[in-house]
């Protein structure tokens, strides 16, 4: 959690540093160090803030903590983060950091098409997520190509919705990630394809998918639920 997010959350409740320090059981000096970025905010303190009713932006939620469940309810989590295409699954406030949800989804061998189409929106919607963490996790799991393709689709969304700052940030991440692009062929979370389906996609995939050695026919014009 960034110090600026920590401070914004405190000020949104109208609390002074001393007020928050008393509620967390720490010193006012430590709160000041967190807000200035001199000390990292521990995950347990973020959990405490949420118990106190403090509303945190999704990117401020913990990246680590409890292990991911065996089966993640991606539809519900994406809906809670605001994805319009799955709004009917919304159950409340987001519980997952979008960066963590993105990595988990990209690691799936088989992901529903509707969910795969939501991932570029997730990247476009949260361009300020912790990209250093995302890229490191992607490399550890050999997900560079899937992530790179997602970034290219998210850049198209940024252009569509005239968000030059988001487009520039995503382009920077993609450029850095391109250095570690894998030579082996991969799918976009669809490993259960037949060989005939794979041959068809090799002929029909868009240039952006081919550039990342991916078998996918997903194009920006298919992202109709990312309004």
Image: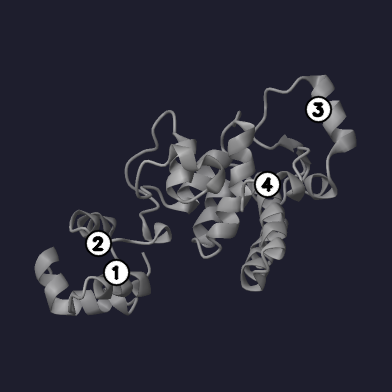
Residue at image point 30% right, 76% down: 35
Mark number displayed over residue 224: 4
Quarter location, residue 218: top right
Which mark is first along the chain, 3 or 2?
Answer: 2
**In the rendered image, is residue 25 in sight?**
no
Residue 50 drawn at (x, y percent): 24, 56
Tell me the mark number nearer the camera, choosing from 1 and 4: 4
Mark number displayed over residue 54: 2
Question: What residue did someone put label 1 on?
Answer: 9
- How far is mark 2 from mark 3, CA to CA? 48 Å
* Location of residue 156 with respect to 203 vertically, above or below: below
Which mark is first along the chain, 1 or 3?
Answer: 1
Residue 176 drawn at (x, y percent): 67, 63
Tell me the mark number nearer the camera, choosing from 3 and 4: 4
Question: Is there CB contact under 8 Å for labels 3 and 4?
Answer: no
Residue at image point 78% right, 38% down: 217
Question: What residue did someone put label 3 on?
Answer: 198
Q: Secondary structure at mark 3?
A: helix
- How far is mark 3 from mark 4, CA to CA? 25 Å
Which mark is first along the chain, 4 or 3?
Answer: 3
């Amino acid at each position: 959690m960034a110090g600026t997010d920590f401070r914004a959350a405190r000020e949104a409740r109208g609390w002074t540093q001393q007020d928050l320090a008393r509620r967390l059981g720490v010193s006012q000096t430590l709160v000041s160090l967190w807000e200035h970025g001199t000390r990292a905010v521990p995950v347990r303190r973020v959990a405490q803030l949420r118990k106190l009713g403090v509303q945190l932006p999704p990117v401020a939620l913990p990246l680590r903590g409890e292990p991911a469940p065996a089966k993640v309810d991606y539809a519900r989590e994406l809906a809670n983060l605001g994805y319009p295409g799955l709004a009917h699954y919304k159950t409340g406030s987001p519980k997952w950091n979008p960066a963590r949800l993105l990595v988990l989804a990209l690691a799936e061998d088989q992901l529903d098409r509707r969910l795969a189409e939501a991932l570029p929106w997730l990247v476009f919607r949260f361009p300020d997520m912790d990209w250093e963490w995302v890229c490191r996790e992607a490399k550890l799991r050999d997900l560079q190509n899937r992530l790179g393709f997602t970034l290219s689709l998210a850049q198209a969304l940024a252009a569509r919705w005239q968000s030059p700052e988001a487009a520039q940030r995503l382009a920077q991440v993609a450029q850095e990630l391109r250095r570690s692009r894998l030579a082996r062929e991969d799918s976009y979370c669809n490993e259960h394809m037949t060989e005939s389906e794979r041959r068809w996609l090799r002929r029909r995939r868009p240039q952006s998918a081919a550039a990342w050695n991916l078998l996918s026919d997903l194009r920006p014009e298919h992202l109709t639920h990312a309004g």
